[in-house]
C-alpha cells in the first residue's frame, strides 16, 4: 500500500510513500531488541557524536531544500519553514551538546553506618527500542526532537511520521544513514493506524514518544505493555493575561505571531486572551487592524504569513466552531470565513461564551478569542478552568502582576511579555493535565530515553 502526499495549498499530489506492513515492523522490532541486548555492539558515544555532527553538516548544506520540502508537504509559509529547518539543525547540535554535558554522579554512602566503607556512582545506559509517532505541524523539527535524542542516547528507533507529512521524516532518516548511522538503528516506518497501535503496544517497545492529539495519545497510553515508558505531547487552548495600561502595539504584534503563526496549527498557539473590560473595544479594534493586514495564501510565496490548514476537513471544522461561537453570542471582529477549500481567514472573536467549543477546546486554526475582565483573579481563574495546561503568558509593566500570574497560572511555563508559542529547543517543554505527560526538549528527552544505573562498591579493606 501507498499513501499519496498532497500539497495542502492546492491539494496537488507531490509524492507517493510506500506504507510498511506488520511483517516488516515485526522484523524491525526484533532487530531493535537484538541490537539493544547485544551490549558489545552498542554504538560508542564518540561514534554517535561523529554521526550526529555529520548529519548536522549535511542538513546545513541542504537547509533550503529541507525548508522547501516543509512548505510543500506541510503548508508552512516559507519564512517560517526556513526557521524550522534552522531549528532542526540546531536540535541535532543540541543532541551532541547533551552528550557532552551528560553523565552520572556520585552518591554519598556514609550518611549512616550501614553505608560506611562503600562507594557509589551512577551512569546512563540506553533504555531500549524506541517507537515514536509524530505530528504534521513541524514535520522536520518534531522528528529531530524524537529521533535525534534516541540516536544520541544509543537506542534503536522506529519513527512513524504523520502520513500527511512523511517526506521530511524520510529525509532526516536518510541523512542519518548517509552520516554513518547503520540502517538498523533508525527505521522510517510510515504505516496505517492499526499497524502503528500494534507497534506501540508491543512488549519489545521500551519507550514510546508521541506528539499528536490528546484523544489518541491517552488511548495509546492505556494500551501499553507493562514496563514501557512514555512521553506524550498534546495541545491546549493557551491563555494570555493582558494587564491594564500596557503598551498595546508590542502586545498586538506578539499575539499576532503567537496566534496566527502556521495559521494557528501549533500546540501552544495563542487562543484565549483576557483584556481589561475598559480596554476591550480598543484592543479588539487594534488586533483586527493588524490581523487584516496579514498576507494569506500560497506558502511558497515569500510574502505569505498565513498558509493553508493541513486538510480541507480542518477548514470545515474551524468554520463550524466559529459559526457556533457567533451564533451563541460571540462578536466577530474580523475574518470568520473560508477563503478557499484550504485557507481560512485570520479571525478574532470577542467574548464567545465559555460553553462554546472555541472557548473549551484547541482550535488548531487561525482564531484568537478575546475576553473582557474586571478582576484579574477571575480572569486567571477562567484561564485555568480547562482540563488542559501547557504554556501561558502575561503582558504587564508591573512586577507584582507578573509574579502573581507566574505563580497563579497553571501552565508548565508562563511567558512574561511574550506570546505562548515561544520556544527554544533546549528548554523544557511539558504539557500538564490532559496536555501531556513528561518533559520535552532535547536533553530532557535524552534522559527519558536512558536509564540511570548505579554501581555500589564494597571493596575489602587493605587490612583484611
Image (cartoon, rainbow, N blue to C red):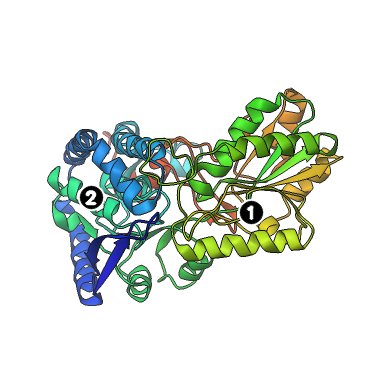
Image: 425 above or below 433: above
**Residue 187 rendering spot, x and y as whole percentages:** 22, 59
Could you tell me which residue is drawn at 51 percent across and 48 percent down? 263
Residue for badge 2: 171
Q: Residue 13 versus residue 242: which sits nearer the camera?
A: 13
Name the quadrant containing residue 159: bottom left
Which mark is first along the chain, 1 or 2? 2
Residue situated in front as seen by the camera: 128 or 436: 436
SS at badge 2: helix
Badge 2 crowding class, 10 Å Cα cut-off, few under 14, some 14 to 19, many 20 or more, is some
Q: Is residue 195 left or right of residue 265?
A: left
Q: Which mark is residue 81?
A: none
| Camera-nearest residue between 18 and 427 | 18
Image coords of residue 351 (percent x, y): 77, 50
Mark identifier at residue 336: 1
Q: How many numbered circles does the render carry?
A: 2
**Which mark is nearer the camera, 2 or 1?**
1
> Is residue 84 rendered to the left or right of residue 249?
left
Quick one: quadrant of the N terminus? bottom left
Q: Secondary structure at mark 1?
A: loop
Please indicate, yes or no, whether residue 217 appears anywhere in the rendered image.
Answer: no
Q: Judge by depth and name the residue closer to the eye, 24 or 351.
A: 351
Image height of 329 relative to 204, above or below = above
Image coords of residue 462 (percent x, y): 26, 33
- Density class for disc 1 (Cα within 10 Å; few <14, some 14-19, many ≥20) is many
The spot of residue 115 in percent (x, y) is 44, 42
Classify residue 326 as left or right of residue 70: right
Amino acid at each position: 500500500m501507498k499513501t499519496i502526499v498532497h500539497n495542502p495549498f492546492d491539494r496537488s499530489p507531490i509524492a507517493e510513500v510506500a506504507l510498511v506492513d506488520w511483517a516488516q515492523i515485526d522484523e524491525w522490532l526484533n532487530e531493535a531488541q537484538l541490537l539493544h541486548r547485544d551490549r558489545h555492539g552498542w554504538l560508542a558515544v564518540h561514534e554517535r557524536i561523529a554521526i550526529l555532527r555529520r548529519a548536522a553538516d549535511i542538513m546545513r548544506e541542504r537547509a533550503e531544500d529541507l525548508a522547501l520540502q516543509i512548505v510543500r508537504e506541510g503548508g508552512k509559509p516559507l519564512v517560517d519553514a526556513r526557521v524550522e529547518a534552522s531549528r532542526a539543525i540546531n536540535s541535532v547540535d543540541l543532541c551532541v551538546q547533551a552528550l557532552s554535558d551528560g553523565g552520572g554522579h556520585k552518591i554519598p554512602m556514609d550518611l549512616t553506618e550501614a553505608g560506611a566503607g562503600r562507594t557509589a556512582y551512577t551512569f546512563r545506559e540506553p533504555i531500549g527500542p524506541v517507537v515514536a509517532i509524530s505530528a504534521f505541524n513541524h514535520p522536520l523539527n518534531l522528528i529531530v526532537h524524537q529521533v535525534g535524542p534516541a540516536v544520541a542516547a544509543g537506542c534503536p528507533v522506529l519513527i512513524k511520521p504523520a502520513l500527511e507529512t512523511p517526506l521530511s521524516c524520510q529525509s532526516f532518516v536518510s541523512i542519518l544513514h548517509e552520516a554513518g548511522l547503520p540502517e538498523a538503528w533508525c527505521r522510517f516506518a510510515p504505516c496505517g493506524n492499526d499497524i502503528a497501535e500494534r507497534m506501540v503496544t508491543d512488549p519489545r517497545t521500551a519507550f514510546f514518544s508521541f506528539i499528536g492529539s490528546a484523544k489518541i495519545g491517552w488511548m495509546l497510553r492505556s494500551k501499553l505493555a507493562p514496563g514501557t515508558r512514555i512521553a506524550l505531547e498534546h495541545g491546549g487552548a493557551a491563555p494570555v493575561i493582558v494587564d491594564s495600561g500596557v503598551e498595546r502595539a508590542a502586545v498586538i504584534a506578539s499575539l499576532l505571531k503567537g496566534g496566527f503563526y502556521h495559521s494557528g496549527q501549533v500546540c501552544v498557539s495563542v487562543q484565549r486572551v483576557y483584556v481589561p473590560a475598559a480596554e476591550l473595544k480598543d484592543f479588539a479594534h487594534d488586533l483586527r487592524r493588524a490581523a487584516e493586514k496579514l498576507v494569506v495564501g500560497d506558502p511558497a510565496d515569500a510574502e505569505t504569513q498565513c498558509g493553508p490548514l493541513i486538510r480541507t476537513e480542518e477548514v470545515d471544522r474551524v468554520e463550524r466552531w466559529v459559526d457556533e461561537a457567533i451564533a451563541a453570542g460571540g462578536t466577530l471582529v474580523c475574518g470568520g470565513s473560508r477563503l478557499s477549500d484550504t485557507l481560512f481567514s485570520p479571525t478574532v472573536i470577542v467574548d464567545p461564551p465559555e460553553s462554546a467549543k472555541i472557548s473549551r477546546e484547541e482550535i488548531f486554526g487561525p482564531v484568537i478569542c478575546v475576553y473582557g475582565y474586571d478582576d484579574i483573579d477571575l480572569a486567571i481563574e477562567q484561564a485555568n478552568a480547562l482540563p488542559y495546561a501547557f504554556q501561558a503568558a502575561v503582558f504587564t509593566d508591573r512586577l507584582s502582576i507578573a509574579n502573581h500570574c507566574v505563580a497563579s497560572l497553571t501552565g508548565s511555563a508562563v511567558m512574561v511579555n511574550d506570546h505562548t508559542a515561544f520556544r527554544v529547543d533546549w528548554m523544557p517543554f511539558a504539557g500538564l493535565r490532559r496536555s501531556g505527560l513528561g518533559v520535552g526538549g532535547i536533553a530532557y528527552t535524552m534522559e527519558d530515553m536512558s536509564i540511570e544505573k548505579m554501581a555500589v562498591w564494597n571493596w575489602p579493606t587493605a587490612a583484611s
